[in-house]
Image (spheres, helix red, strand yellow):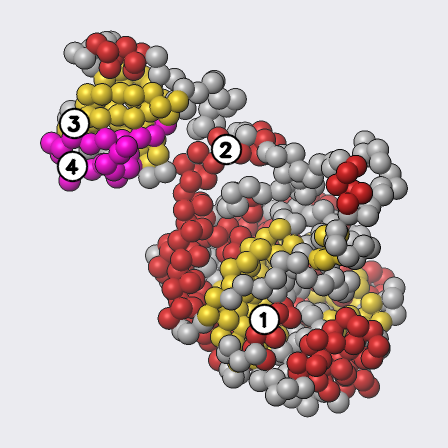
Amino acid sequence: MRTTYCGLVTEALLGQTVTLCGWVNRRRDHGGVIFVDLRDREGYVQVVCDPDRPDMFKAAEGLRNEFCIQVKGLVRARPEGTTNESLKSGKIEVLCQELTVLNPSVTPPFQLDDENLSETTRLVHRVLDLRRPYMQKNLMLRYKVTMEVRKFLDANGFVDIETPMLTKSTPEGARDYLVPSRVHDGMFFALPQSPQLFKQLLMMAGFDRYYQITKCFRDEDLRADRQPEFTQIDVETSFLTEEEIRTMFEGMIRTVFKNAIGVEIGAFPVMKYTDAMRLYGSDKPDLRVKMQFTELTDVMKDVDFKVFSGAANSPEGRVVALRVPGGGAMSRGEIDGYGEFVKIYGAKGLAWIKVNDAAAGREGLQSPIVKNLHDRAIAEIVARTGAASGDLIFFGADKAKVVNDAIGALRVKVGHSEFGKAHGLIEGEWKPLWVIDFPMFEFDEEGQRWNAVHHPFTSPKEGHEDWLETDPGRCVAKAYDAVLNGIELGGGSVRIHREEVQSKVFRALKIGAEEAQLKFGFLLDALQYGAPPHGGIAIGLDRFVMLMTGAESLRDVIAFPKTQRAQDLLTQAPSPVDEKQLRELHIRLRNPQPAA
């Protein structure tokens, strides 16, 4: 039906007859000559219809946006002064000889070049939305990324093995999507949150290097830009150390960036989790922003300002400063705006000091809090932050988590603001890093128990096994996250490969022997048959592509995404099912009426 794509018609085909198929992007009538911008996945070409062929011209007069047509015509150079340098086909046009309407279109609900469409409109009419060049480009890049990943992994001896979609529910972590069994009354499968245990079992089975680009499912509470189903580049390997695993997958990420979009992102610096939290308040810091925290907890224990001294004397408290170079130029309105912003993260407010004259000590500082700080505290603030005249210093004082979240978010917001860009507070397009040495456990105050930070199959550092039962809070994990521009690309770890260590971890998590056998007996059994040292990583494909495209939402790099309320507006899923289906599944609804 066609000889080439519309977007690939170039000067190389001058003088040749081509057959094209595509959609009418726009039809323009210029004084007896009709111009049609014909579009397909590769781009646009201009088709010229003149009245010399009456039947063809009559068909062209009836064309409207989104008609699907076939065109046969001669490739010729555009007249001088009418070329379009932004198009691959911008130096040529196709003189139409035959035109066939393959399928007309009703009037589309929106113009495809409308950039102000609501997300609801786009998702309800997703088929038309996907015709837009922006979405076509994003999804073609997604395909290119997966091909580059496969090429890299194939070249390094990895085997693509599928793992089950219907598996066992394990209530730890996020909620499972449950699938009722018709055959086994009252029993349920779960959709996988990750192929974690299966890929470990494949290592124990001797496959040595496994990968899979697979769907995962999490029934999480509604959060911005989270998808209930997402795609993971899932990898596991045996007989590599933690450093060797990181080196290999750093190579993969860098290779994919270079081959897919021509970008060199450079080597990944390595940062310990404790340093990331101390300097940036985040375990995924955006290193493009050039500001860091300054620790002041020890200095503020005896100041009169209770907000500072209260936090400084609390075992869970923290006091930090964030120096904004040149920030003295900010208006009071801007500062107050940032004060409101940090409240989103639990902060009660935002203390600040403007440094008008760094050499003048107390007299050179402007702030309502200066009078409540003694001279030593003021001297330490200026010395430790390296404040210069014209700077602004923000402060966080609260529980460490609140300070880290609030001032960490403030750092990024100021850095990315127009003020930050104008004052050089952000630099570079791509700033990757590895964050390593995560704590193994975090304490859940409400449940009065330890929870795994990553998952309970992560190996502790050498020598830390002894603390698993005596002091879990001291245990550091062989875990690592790949971070790019403040976004976690993926995470992984070296896994536990000895049954007695895995059982110790379960006990630390208050999972008793009976419960462990019930939930994870198959894993504990397999670990006893000479399981090899192994580890791996999982990289979120959706976020990976989102970063590459510069898209603001995951929904712009997924063909058929869900909304923030976990709904598919195109197919109207989820939806009710009939009583017969429910009876077959042995299910009776407690609340048969859908919630309003």
Name which of mark 2 and mark 1 comes first in the sequence: 2
Residue on which the image places disc 2: 127
Q: Residues within 10 Å of mark 4 (few under 14, many from 20)?
A: some
The mark closer to the camera, 2 or 1, is 1
Name the residue rendered at 66%, 46% in the picture. 224
**Circle nearer the viewer, 3 or 1:** 1
Res. 74 mark: 3
Along the polypeptide, which appears first: circle 4 or circle 3?
4
**Residue 14 rendering spot, x and y as whole percentages:** 13, 34
Picture coordinates of residue 542 (x, y %)?
Answer: 53, 52
Image spot of residue 384 (x, y percent): 64, 71
Report whether 97 appears left or right of 281.
left
- Check if residue 12 falls in the magenta segment: yes
Distance between mark 3 and mark 1 Cα atoms:
55 Å
- Counting residues from the N terminus, which is met first, the one under dot 1 or under dot 4? 4
The residue that mark 4 highlights is 13
Horizontal placement of 82 versus 441: left or right?
Answer: left
* In the rendered image, the vertical position of residue 366 relative to residue 523, given as above or below: above
Secondary structure under the numbered disc 1 in the rendered image: helix
Say which amino acid is labelled 4: Leu
Secondary element type, mark 4: helix
Instruction: Name the kind of residue labelled 1 in the image.
Output: Lys
Mark 3–mark 2 Cα distance, whole angstroms, equals 31 Å
CA–CA distance between discs 2 and 4?
32 Å
Badge 2 or badge 4: first in the primary sequence: 4
